[in-house]
Image: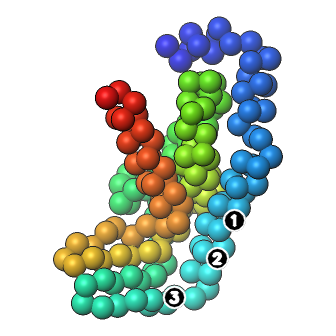
């Protein structure tokens, strides 16, 4: 189906979709979120801190090199994850007219994906740093980009479920 859609599209439609996606205000938000992710990673690389510790809530910062995806799964396949992320971006450009209603949430999702993609390209791993424990549950170590991706996916899925009902 995707290949059929690509064949049907002409270059003008592709250019038009790229212009719609990269509106200046969205582009500024995108760059801002990617920079926040990068600054947090640089700070973490240089200073390791324990932030908040109580009996109920514990939040720490560590320096972890993750060569996999979420939860460290599939470690060592950096090139595959780079290709998958680039394909993810290209599919969004091709199908923008179908997904544009999620513009803001896609911006957040893409900023997170770009933050992790840049780590994979330039360092060969994604830096994770946040450790969160609430009551007895400890979340796997994650980063700011992961927060952006998770929140946006949850909102998009929620909107899709609401739309279908």
- Asked whether residue 79 is in view, the answer is no
- Seen in the picture, residue 75 relative to 20 is either above or below; the reply is below
13 on left or right of 102: right
In terms of sequence position, does the residue under pointer 3 or pointer 1 come before the other? 1
What crowding class fits label 2: few (fewer than 14 Cα within 10 Å), some (14-19), or many (20 or more)? few
Residue 34 picture location, percent across and down: 66, 60
Q: Quadrant of the C terminus?
A: top left
Mark 2 and 3 residues: CB-CB less than 8 Å, in contact? no
In terms of sequence position, does the residue under pointer 1 or pointer 2 come before the other? 1
Tell which residue pokes out farthest to the left in this image. Answer: 136
The residue carrying mark 3 is: 48
Identify the residue at image location x=57%, y=43%: 106
Q: Which mark is residue 42?
A: 2
Q: For the residue labelled by badge 1, is the local secondary structure a helix, a strand or a loop? A: helix
Residue 32 picture location, percent across and down: 71, 61
| Distance in Å between CA atoms under marks 1 and 2 | 10 Å
| Distance in Å between CA atoms under marks 3 and 1 | 20 Å
Closest to the observer: 76 or 6?
6
Q: Which mark is residue 35?
A: 1
Residue 133 picture location, percent across and down: 30, 77
- Seen in the picture, residue 86 relative to 17 is either above or below; the reply is below
């Amino acid at each position: 189906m995707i290949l059929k859609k690509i064949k049907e599209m002409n270059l003008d439609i592709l250019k038009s979709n790229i212009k719609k996606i990269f509106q200046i205000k969205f582009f500024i938000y995108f760059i801002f979120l990617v920079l926040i992710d990068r600054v947090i990673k640089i700070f973490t690389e240089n200073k390791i801190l324990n932030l908040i510790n109580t009996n109920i809530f514990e939040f720490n910062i560590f320096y972890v090199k993750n060569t996999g995806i979420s939860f460290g799964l599939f470690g060592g396949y950096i090139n595959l994850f780079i290709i998958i992320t680039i394909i993810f971006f290209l599919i969004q450009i091709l199908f923008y007219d179908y997904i544009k209603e999620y513009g803001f949430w896609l911006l957040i999702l893409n900023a997170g994906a770009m933050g992790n993609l840049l780590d994979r390209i330039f360092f060969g791993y994604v830096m994770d740093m946040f450790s969160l424990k609430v009551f007895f549950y400890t979340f796997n170590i994650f980063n700011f980009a992961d927060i952006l991706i998770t929140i946006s996916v949850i909102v998009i899925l929620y909107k899709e479920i609401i739309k279908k009902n």
